Image (tube, rainbow, N blue to C red):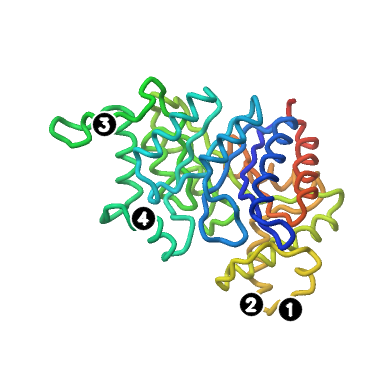
């Protein structure tokens, strides 16, 4: 059976403030390890009232310390927000403390709005063109000592110097990151849970163009997708109403804490809202464990995914836990 993993945004709800959401992430990570999930990744978002996950590297350390086997990583570090040297050193420290358990997932987007993005980078030197590509190349050069003679970074070493960077994954919601991951021989994770781009097109292109590297001999692709499982289809649909309202509000630029299913059910949706909800449902598998399993396996088959990573924006933490429990059981995850 295909491996399952968790992508966690630490959802903030009208009943769960950000501080509690972070503690919920620790609780869910411990559960995910007991249930047999392969890895637990933390997202990076800023200035969003519905997401508490703003510092994945800090949460990676906390979660890795609270668990013993599950791989823990970033899904991902938004590289344009950070100096490559700082990213290298933080993840080397994590790798030194938790050897063989850390993943470095890198993303191109800022994970926020333009003003907040500017605030994040205000003290950094402005760069023209594709900041991600430039910073990504700088990160690799720092790791492999590839700067030429005379370059100011020639003698800069990311510390601890005796620790290699953990495996690098490129995250994407289009074909660009897929091509980049293939060219560098890296793992690739596609964000099906919010991407308009066709997942199969990106992931199959990644496989076709993949060039083996010193760190990865064969392509490995993760499909990140949204799912909500419950004891029956009707209950899952009720729980998923919170995510539907969140999507409708986000399309209007309203980033509010996640509402309860009851509030979501009573919301005065317009015809345009309902069209948006229908599009969102194409990216969300909701239902009984068997219903969700069938949807996820069909997606995995269409995209040739090696692994499925599940994210769940659920109002009630107990319901979110139960969703992952049901999926672990129906997929017969090894414990």
Residue 275 on image: x %, y %: 65, 72
Q: Quadrant of residue 328?
A: top right
Asked whether the beta carbons under mark 2 and mark 3 sit within 8 Å of each other, the answer is no
Which quadrant would residue 68 be assigned to in this image?
Answer: top right
The correct choice, above or below, for 83 with respect to 250 in the image is: above
Residue marked by disc 2: 272
Q: Which residue is mark 1?
A: 268
The quadrant of the image that shows the C terminus is top right
- Disc 3 designates what residue? 156
Circle 3 Cα neighbour tier, 10 Å, few/some/many (<14 / 14–19 / ≥20): few
Which residue has dot 4 on it?
121
Q: Secondary structure at mark 2?
A: helix
Give the image location of residue 273, x and y in percent.
Answer: 66, 74
- Give the mark nearer the N terminus: 4 vs 1: 4
The circle drawn on residue 322 is none
Disc 4/disc 3 C-alpha distance (Å): 22 Å
> Which one is earlier in the sequence, the residue at label 2 or at label 4?
4
């Amino acid at each position: 059976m295909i491996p399952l993993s968790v992508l966690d945004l630490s959802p903030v709800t009208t009943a769960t403030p950000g501080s509690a959401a972070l503690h919920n992430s620790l609780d869910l990570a411990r559960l995910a390890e007991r249930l047999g999930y392969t890895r637990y990744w933390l997202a990076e978002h800023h200035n969003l009232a519905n997401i508490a996950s703003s510092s994945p590297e800090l949460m990676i350390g906390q979660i890795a310390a609270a668990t013993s086997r599950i791989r823990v990583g970033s899904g991902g570090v938004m590289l344009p927000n950070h100096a490559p040297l700082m990213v290298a050193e933080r993840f080397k420290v994590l790798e030194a403390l938790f050897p063989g358990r850390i993943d470095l997932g890198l993303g191109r987007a800022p994970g926020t709005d333009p003003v907040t993005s500017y605030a994040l980078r205000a003290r950094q030197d402005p760069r023209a063109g594709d900041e991600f590509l430039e910073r990504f190349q700088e990160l690799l050069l720092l790791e492999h000592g590839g700067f030429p003679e005379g370059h100011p970074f020639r003698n800069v070493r990311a510390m601890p110097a005796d620790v290699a960077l953990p495996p690098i994954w490129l995250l994407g919601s289009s074909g660009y990151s897929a091509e980049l991951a293939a060219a560098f021989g890296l793992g690739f994770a596609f964000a099906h849970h919010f991407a308009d781009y066709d997942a199969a097109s990106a992931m199959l292109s990644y496989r076709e163009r993949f060039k083996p590297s010193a760190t990865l001999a064969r392509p490995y692709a993760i499909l990140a997708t949204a799912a909500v499982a419950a004891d029956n289809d009707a209950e899952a649909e009720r729980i998923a109403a919170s995510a539907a309202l969140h999507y409708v509000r986000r399309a209007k630029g309203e980033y509010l804490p996640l509402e309860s299913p009851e509030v979501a059910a009573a919301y005065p949706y317009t015809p345009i809202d309902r069209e948006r909800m229908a599009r969102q449902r194409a990216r969300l598998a909701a239902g009984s464990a068997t219903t969700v399993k069938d949807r996820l396996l069909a997606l995995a088959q269409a995209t040739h995914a090696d692994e499925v990573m599940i994210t769940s924006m659920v109002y009630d933490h107990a319901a979110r836990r139960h969703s992952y429990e049901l999926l672990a059981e129906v997929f017969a995850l090894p414990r």
